[in-house]
Image: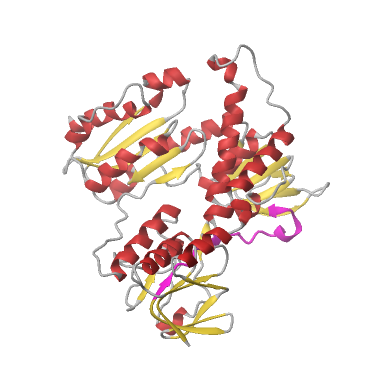
């Protein structure tokens, strides 16, 4: 039986970082890949979705070029269907045609042993992959997550996608019913709407991005409505059925129905912890996945670590990468902590939504002496130049300690100018220092100065 210093179950973002980092440091590593090397993100999630969002954004910009003085008269951007086909070509190029050969070869060149197939723990210290047993000294569980599909009556009778299928398909339906108003639902609703698809988005809570600041939800709803998306919040789909012509009819609780050519289900994700043999190690996953400590070690179990979506806390690619680095450092004897105080959260609509740290509600629940300031990015000189009218800034501070504990932004490039606030929350930079930072003129980050000064002055 071949033995490895470390076996990693899962070859997504965390698995890549861990396997590659340890192999380069001279450890023997077996990486078990039940799916793409690199995970979902490069091939059927983050990268293809951001490619489509970029194409849709540029298409909208070109259509309004005359309003910005770029051309003398309106430009013809062509047929929606033709443009969609072109966008799909670019998307698939960005997603490397869903071929992970290059990623696999990169890891193997670093000395990683790649084992294709599903891995399962068969005894303490042993994993089986497609009938082959291997031994390990340390085990890392980085098996990721999968889309959650609600048990809708009739769903097997209608054409439906998860985001994985939507971001792999060439199809541009004439109409689309999006079930779920979270980040992915909002992003894809905007993409399809900007390519001429009649989009209706249904969200069971009373607002989009439930859990975000209310001002953020409102701003996001305004921008999607401006793109032609019909939004139904506080609505629950009770059942679906095939409609005439091969589409889908959704029955709403309390009455009413919605029809579309296709259903897109984006109601969240669940950690992949089933059928891994974890019980043989005395591990019982919770509803949100595996519980880990500040070192990314599974609580109560020696020599077992977990990273990425499988712990269900902050299911982002950058979180998985961060945790992967923590585990590499720990296994190499270096100090590292999985500090999630300032994990950025972004929705890549146009304009994007970006946040970090606590919301006002979360800060109040935590017993913090909360101070809040708000500002409109449209009041900056840069917004006047770019004709950017939609957006918001919400900053949350701990009045007693004089530090920022949370920030939420909506505005052009907000995902980029969030960076300085992420550092501020992580490093607990005093408000007085933040308020005195000189922002370049004219930039959208100037929208941070008035609320920071107000917070600093108490």
Q: In this view, does 381 lie to the left or right of 197?
A: left
Q: Position of residue 265 (x, y in %)?
A: 62, 52
Is 185 situated above or below 275? above
Q: In this view, does 176 lie to the left or right of 50?
A: right
Q: Which residue lies furthest to the front in this view?
A: 109
Please identify the quarter of the rendering in which residue 455 is found: top left
The residue sitting at 56% across, 39% down in the picture is: 53
Q: Is residue 362 left or right of residue 169?
A: left
Q: Is 155 one of the magenta-colored residues?
A: yes
The residue sitting at 27% across, 51% down in the picture is: 366
Between 421 and 199, the one nearer to me in the picture: 421
Between 252 and 85, the one nearer to me in the picture: 85
Q: Position of residue 261 (x, y in %)?
A: 74, 45
Check the picture and name the quadrant holding the C terminus: top left
Is 40 situated above or below 332? above
Q: Is residue 5 left or right of residue 371?
A: right
* Number of numbered discs overlaid on the protein picture: 0
Q: Where is residue 371 in the image (x, y as percent from the top left)?
A: 24, 37
Residue 267, visible in the rendered structure: no
Is 287 situated above or below 165? below
The stretch of residues the image draws in magenta is 139-160
């Amino acid at each position: 039986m071949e033995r490895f210093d470390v076996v990693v179950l899962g070859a997504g973002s965390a698995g890549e970082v861990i396997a590659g980092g340890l192999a380069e440091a001279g450890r023997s590593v077996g990486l078990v890949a039940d799916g793409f090397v690199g995970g979902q993100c490069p091939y059927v999630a983050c990268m293809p979705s951001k490619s489509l969002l970029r194409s849709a954004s540029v298409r909208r910009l070109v259509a309004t070029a005359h309003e910005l003085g770029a051309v003398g008269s309106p430009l013809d951007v062509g047929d929606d269907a033709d443009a969609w086909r072109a966008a799909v070509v670019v998307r698939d190029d960005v997603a490397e045609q869903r071929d992970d050969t290059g990623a696999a070869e990169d890891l193997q060149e670093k000395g990683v042993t790649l084992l294709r197939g599903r891995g399962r723990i068969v005894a303490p210290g042993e994993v089986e992959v497609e009938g082959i047993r291997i031994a390990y000294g340390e085990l890392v569980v980085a098996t990721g997550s999968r889309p959650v599909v609600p048990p809708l009556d009739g769903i097997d009778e209608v054409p439906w996608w998860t985001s994985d299928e939507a971001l792999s398909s060439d199809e541009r339906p004439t109409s689309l019913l999006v079930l779920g108003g979270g980040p992915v639902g909002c992003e894809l609703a905007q993409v399809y709407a900007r390519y001429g698809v009649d989009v209706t988005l249904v969200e069971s809570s009373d607002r989009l991005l439930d859990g975000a600041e209310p001002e953020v939800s409102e701003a996001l709803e305004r921008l999607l409505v401006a793109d032609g998306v019909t939004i139904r919040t506080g609505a629950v789909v009770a059942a679906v059925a095939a409609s005439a012509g091969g589409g889908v009819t959704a029955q709403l609780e309390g009455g009413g129905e919605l029809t579309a050519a296709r259903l897109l289900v984006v109601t969240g994700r669940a950690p992949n912890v089933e059928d891994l043999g974890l019980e043989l190690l005395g591990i019982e996953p919770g509803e949100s996945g595996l519980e880990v400590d500040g070192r990314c070690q599974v609580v109560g179990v020696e020599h077992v670590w977990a990273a990425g979506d499988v712990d269900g806390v902050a299911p982002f690619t950058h979180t998985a990468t961060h945790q992967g680095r923590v585990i590499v450092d720990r296994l190499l004897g270096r100090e590292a902590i999985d500090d999630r105080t300032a994990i950025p959260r972004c929705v890549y609509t146009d304009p994007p939504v970006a946040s970090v740290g606590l919301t006002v509600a979360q800060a109040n629940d935590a017993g913090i002496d909360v101070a809040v300031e708000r500002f409109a990015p449209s009041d900056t000189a840069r917004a006047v130049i770019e004709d950017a009218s939609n957006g918001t800034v919400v900053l949350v501070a701990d009045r007693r300690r004089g530090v920022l504990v949370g920030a939420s932004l909506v505005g052009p490039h907000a995902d980029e100018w969030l960076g300085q606030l992420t550092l501020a929350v992580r490093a607990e930079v005093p408000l007085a220092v933040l308020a005195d930072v000189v922002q370049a003129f004219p930039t959208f980050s100037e929208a941070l100065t008035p609320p920071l000064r107000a917070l600093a002055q108490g």
